[in-house]
Image (cartoon, rainbow, N blue to C red):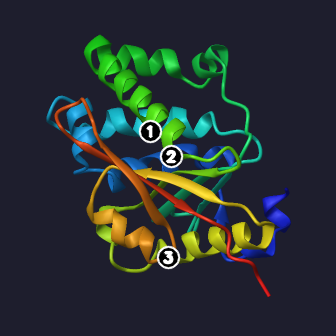
């Protein structure tokens, strides 16, 4: 799939390599206040650390991933991984800045982040179907929330998924987001209580809606 020629994304800005830090900064800002990330940071959300986390995560996206924003300013960002995509290797992770992240986060935060990732994988094995794509991240800068910067992104993605007959899976860390995704035809398939501070993880899926 060539996202640049896909009409579903004609109104979206498609991430280029030089946009990595700006997209990561938007995700770090948009996820501020999320209890899970505050827990990873030992109670005080660290924007610079989380920006580095998202920078590495975006750098590791597979070549067929969809990473879009409302504009070059990246007021809102969405990252989607198609089904059956190749997971990055340890060498890929190090090349993307994983060693820098390890040094900046410190051992305690890395352990918490690793435990968090393990829980994400476990809930995915329980509720994600083999042919589901994965909505990895979707967030809007705090000062732009409520201004409809994100809606065109999720709409574009879902139009593409419906046209290609692709189902989608996501986890959300906040109960308030469940209704948001239900508005876009996602269904809550399960929830689990994290072992990290009694926090909750919500698993949601959306089947493709056939286009006429």
Determine which residue is flagged by label 1.
123
Q: Is the residue marked by circle 1 packed among few (<14), some (14-19), or many (20+) residues within 10 Å?
A: some
Question: Is 122 drawn above or below residue 135 in the view shown?
Answer: above
Element assignment for label 1:
helix
The earlier-in-sequence mark between 1 and 3 is 1
Q: Secondary structure at mark 3?
A: helix
| First of labels 2, 3 by sequence position | 2
Mark 1–mark 2 contact, CB under 8 Å?
Answer: yes
Q: Are marks 1 and 3 in contact (CB under 8 Å)?
A: no
- Relative placement, left or right, of 81 versus 7 is left
Q: Is residue 143 left or right of residue 54?
A: left
Q: What is the x, y in percent for residue 108?
A: 26, 15
Is 114 situated left or right of 84 in this image? left
The image's mark for residue 151 is: 3
Q: Indicate the position of residue 88 as horizontal and vertical percent values.
A: 66, 26
**Vertical relation: 123 (above or below) 175:** above
Task: Please tell me whether mark 2 sits on a helix, a strand or a loop.
Answer: helix
Q: Residue at x 71, y 39 (%)?
A: 62
Q: Position of residue 28 (x, y in %)?
A: 37, 47
Q: Quadrant of residue 78?
A: bottom right
Front disc: 1 or 3: 1
Please give the count of numbered marks on the rendered protein: 3
Residue wearing tag 2: 127
């Amino acid at each position: 799939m060539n996202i640049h020629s896909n009409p579903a994304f004609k109104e979206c800005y498609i991430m280029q390599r030089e946009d990595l830090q700006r997209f990561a900064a938007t995700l770090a800002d948009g996820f501020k206040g999320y209890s899970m990330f505050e827990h990873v940071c030992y109670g005080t959300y660290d924007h610079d650390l989380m920006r580095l986390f998202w920078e590495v995560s975006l750098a590791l996206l597979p070549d067929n991933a969809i990473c879009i924003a409302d504009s070059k300013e990246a007021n809102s960002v969405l990252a989607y991984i198609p089904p059956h995509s190749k997971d990055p290797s340890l060498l890929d992770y190090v090349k993307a800045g994983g060693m820098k992240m390890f040094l900046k986060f410190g051992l305690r935060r890395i352990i918490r982040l690793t435990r968090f990732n393990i829980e994400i994988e476990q809930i995915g094995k329980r509720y994600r179907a083999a042919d589901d794509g994965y909505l990895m991240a979707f967030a809007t800068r705090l000062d732009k929330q409520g201004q409809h910067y994100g809606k065109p992104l999720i709409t574009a993605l879902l139009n593409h998924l419906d046209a290609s007959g692709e189902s989608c899976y996501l986890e959300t860390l906040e109960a308030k987001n469940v209704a948001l995704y239900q508005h876009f035809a996602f269904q809550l398939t399960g929830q689990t209580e994290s072992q990290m501070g009694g926090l909750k993880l919500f698993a949601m899926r959306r089947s493709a809606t056939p286009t006429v």
